Image: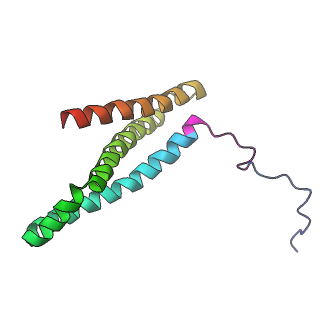
Amino acid sequence: MADVNRGNRPLSPHLMIYRPQWTSISSIFVRITGNALIVAALMAVWWLVALSTGPEAYARANGFITSWFGDLIMLGSVACLWYHLLGGVRHLIWDSGHMLDVEKSELFAQMSVVGTVLLTIFTIIVV
């Protein structure tokens, strides 16, 4: 029979006592940005389908994508793309057995954020 006396058992760390590290937050954001890129991909597919459907559908899709909200989504998708790429590079480096100590891992997570901001600004200026 199951033990119903749960008061004496230790609790797992939870949000009130757990201090998030750079590496854990970065890993979570890599997953979030991967899912957010689906939105940009669906918008691009919508635009291409509308382009092949006809002028009315294209005007509607193009009007949305070139609106301020569409521009905001595309800007966010560029940032997500760079962050997801840098997070993937970080995981490849880890898979090769390098930068596994805490200090280097946290430094690389911080540099991923800085790199994302710089590469996003560079992409906006150049493209």
- Of 85 and 2, the residue lying toward us: 85
Left or right side of 18 for 10: right
Please check the rendered image and state whether residue 117 is part of the magenta-colored stretch, yes or no. no
Residue at 68% across / 39% down in the picture?
19
**Image position, residue 97 (x, y; %):** 49, 31
Count of labels shown?
0
**Image position, residue 44 (x, y; %):** 22, 58
**Image position, residue 113 (x, y; %):** 44, 34
Q: Say which quarter of the image contains residue 6.
A: bottom right
**Image position, residue 63 (x, y; %):** 18, 61
Q: Residue furthest bottom?
A: 1
Q: Locate the N terminus by quadrant.
A: bottom right
Can the viewer see residue 46 in this picture? yes
Residue at 23% across / 57% down in the picture?
65
Can the viewer see residue 98 in this picture? no
Q: Locate the C terminus by quadrant.
A: top left
Residue at 34% across / 58% down in the picture?
38
Left or right side of 118 for 45: left
Q: Say which quarter of the image contains residue 41.
A: bottom left
- Dominant secondary structure (helix, strand or loop) of the stretch shown in magenta: loop
The answer to whether residue 51 is above or below residue 75 is: below
The answer to whether residue 45 is above or below residue 91 is: below
Looking at the picture, the colour scheme in use is rainbow
Left or right side of 116 for 6: right
Tell me where the magenta segment starts and ends, as one range: 14-23
Please check the rendered image and state whether residue 22 is part of the magenta-colored stretch, yes or no. yes
The answer to whether residue 31 is above or below residue 24 is: below
Left or right side of 104 for 56: left
The answer to whether residue 57 is above or below residue 126 is: below
